[in-house]
Image (tube, rainbow, N blue to C red):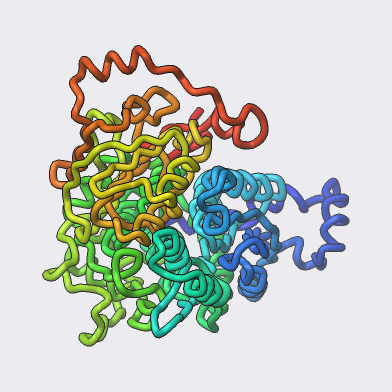
């Protein structure tokens, strides 16, 4: 626990901005934005809002920011709301525009750090919806190391059509079905119009809900914060309580470095694995760990994954939505189950000022009638569905999402595409056949640049009924909504000379989750010959934010970070 010495100054940063006669000009500028005389003696709390009408994930967050500000003010702080950006993966998916998605994580982190650093706020409440918001906010919190709490904007409710639950992935798979002429245009239109009923982030255990759950397990959100609908009284209350709790952190001097420890990251991994979370978890946790100074590697995911089972029957590979899990009790009973089994570190400090064990002490188990979360002795998969693969095709690693539904081994012939666009056209034109391994390259952090997601591709494959018969590998990444036999984040990427850049159509590729290998059936001599013949592709962008990103970004195996100096 942190020191409670009287020497601690809860106004450590704001006092520099507003105290003293020489700061009269600063105070003068703050009065028109709502500061009263008494406010200058209060800790100033930045409330980073990702509100925008860009996407339904974030369209309600302005109201949540207002509630967080009320909580801060009630606890005798002075809340100041400011904005940062968001983009939408779901809207830009399958287009060149999607390259900006991962870049937005860095822009969000940089912008929050910039405002907080310039304005001298003593603490931070950050509210995020769409999935890059969350790691972006946490990276900023880690860099700043000022008292901070993250609030998830909440999950969307399910759409419905003909008695079947819908979400955004339903639309992508319907596109594939339509391309395969298995549904009429009228059915595609009906699914399109009914899939997204209102505000909130994607409804399955996709990246947004994965990251929200992981952040709560890490201790950087209030208990139960991740399992709430976007439009609910509970979410508004959560925001007010976050504002109040943040003031307690400020008074006690509790900062992210005391919470975001190596054991806390292991807790985040454990809960996300048990929930069947997104492959993007790997990329984002690596980046967050770098920002706080915690040494985290791909090998940690393998180590933790060997002892943690997948327990949740949640979309995309399962039957249920996040809204269903909320109705069943959220993730707190799951965390208590994992804690009691010795799979969580209960001594980790959290934003409540208490340990994880203390937070979970009075949590009741799930009702016996629910079947969303399996018991530990009857898991969906006995080890993690997130499998780190290595081999002559991925010397530095790749990330597979293998739930078990699709089998544990796939061997097939390569169908090589040098861009995401070319691959998607081939899939929609029905050029991919049973036994193919679709290889999409030059889409890594540098080569893309920006590491596009492949949900359009995997959705189309699923929609054509090829989910169990086709594999896809890429140096890009996947949406949390992706399911099937897929491997992403392959490193080194093609653009820097990685082996994936040497593959030719017709080569035999084996993906083996049991041996954790990704192998191309070529001799070392043949690979060396091809490497000599390989030519570095020309940059796709030579100016602007994408070019800047490509010049600074690290390998996906280290989190695709941009501040590794």
At which x and y percent is residue 30?
82, 58
Relative to 406, say whether 235 is above or below.
Answer: below
What residue is drawn where x is 53% and y is 60%?
130
Relative to 170, say whether 501 is above or below.
Answer: above
Q: Is residue 156 visible?
A: no
At which x and y percent is residue 491?
35, 33
What residue is drawn where x is 49% and y is 23%?
537
Q: Quadrant of residue 411?
A: top left
What residue is drawn where x is 46% and y is 77%?
158
Task: Name the side, left or right, on which 535 lies relative to 412.
Answer: right
Q: Quadrant of residue 417?
A: top left
Q: Is residue 157 visible?
A: yes
What residue is drawn where x is 46% and y is 62%?
175
**Towards the viewer: 524 or 22:** 524
**Towards the viewer: 65 or 501:** 501
Relative to 54, say whether 541 is above or below.
Answer: above
At which x and y percent is residue 334?
28, 71
The quarter of the image holding the N terminus is bottom left
**Towards the viewer: 561 or 352:** 561
């Amino acid at each position: 626990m942190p020191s409670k010495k009287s020497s601690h100054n809860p106004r450590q940063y704001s006092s520099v901005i507003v105290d003293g006669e020489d700061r009269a000009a600063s105070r003068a500028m703050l009065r028109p934005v709502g500061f009263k005389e008494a406010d200058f003696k209060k800790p100033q709390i930045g409330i980073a809002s990702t509100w925008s009408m860009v996407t339904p994930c974030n369209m309600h967050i302005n109201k949540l920011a207002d509630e967080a500000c009320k909580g801060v003010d009630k606890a005798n702080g002075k809340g100041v709301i400011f904005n940062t950006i968001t983009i939408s993966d779901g809207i830009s998916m399958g287009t060149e525009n999607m390259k900006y998605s991962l870049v937005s994580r860095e822009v969000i982190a940089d912008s929050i750090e910039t405002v907080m650093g310039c304005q001298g706020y003593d603490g931070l409440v950050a509210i995020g919806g769409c999935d890059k918001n969350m790691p972006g906010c946490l990276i900023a919190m880690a860099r700043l190391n000022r008292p901070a709490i993250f609030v998830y904007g909440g999950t969307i409710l399910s759409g419905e059509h003909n008695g079947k639950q819908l979400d955004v992935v339903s639309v992508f798979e319907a596109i594939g079905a339509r391309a395969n002429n298995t549904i009429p245009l009228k059915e595609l239109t009906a699914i399109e119009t009914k899939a997204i009923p209102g505000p909130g982030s994607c409804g399955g255990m996709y990246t947004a809900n994965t990251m929200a759950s992981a952040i709560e397990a890490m201790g950087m959100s209030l208990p139960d914060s991740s399992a709430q609908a976007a439009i609910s009284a509970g979410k508004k209350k959560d925001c007010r309580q976050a504002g109040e709790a943040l003031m307690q952190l400020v008074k006690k001097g509790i900062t992210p470095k005391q919470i975001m420890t190596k054991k806390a990251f292991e807790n985040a991994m454990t809960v996300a694995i048990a929930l069947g979370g997104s492959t993007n978890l790997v990329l984002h946790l690596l980046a967050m760990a770098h920002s706080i100074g915690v040494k985290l590697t791909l090998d940690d995911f393998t180590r933790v994954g060997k002892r943690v089972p997948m327990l949740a029957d949640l979309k995309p590979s399962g039957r249920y939505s996040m809204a269903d899990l909320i109705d069943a009790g959220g993730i707190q009973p799951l965390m208590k189950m994992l804690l009691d089994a010795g799979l969580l570190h209960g001594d980790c400090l959290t934003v409540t000022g208490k340990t994880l064990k203390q937070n979970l002490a009075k949590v009741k188990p799930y009702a016996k009638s629910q079947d969303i979360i399996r018991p530990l002795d009857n898991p969906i998969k006995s080890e993690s569905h997130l499998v780190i693969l290595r081999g002559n095709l991925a010397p530095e690693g790749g990330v597979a999402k293998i739930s078990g539904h699709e089998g544990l081994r796939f061997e097939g012939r390569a169908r090589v595409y040098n861009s995401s666009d070319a691959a998607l056209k081939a899939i929609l034109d029905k050029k991919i056949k049973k036994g193919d391994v679709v290889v999409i390259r030059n889409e890594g952090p540098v080569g893309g640049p920006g590491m596009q997601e492949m949900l359009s591709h995997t959705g189309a494959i699923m929609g054509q009924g090829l989910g169990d018969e086709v594999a896809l590998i890429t140096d890009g990444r996947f949406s949390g909504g992706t399911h099937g036999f897929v491997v992403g984040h392959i490193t080194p990427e093609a653009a820097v000379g990685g082996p994936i850049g040497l593959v030719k159509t017709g080569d035999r590729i084996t993906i083996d989750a049991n041996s954790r290998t990704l192998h191309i059936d070529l001799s070392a001599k043949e690979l060396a010959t091809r490497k000599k013949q390989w030519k570095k592709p020309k940059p796709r962008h030579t100016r602007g934010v994408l070019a800047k990103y490509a010049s600074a970004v690290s390998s996906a195996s280290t989190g695709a970070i941009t501040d590794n100096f």
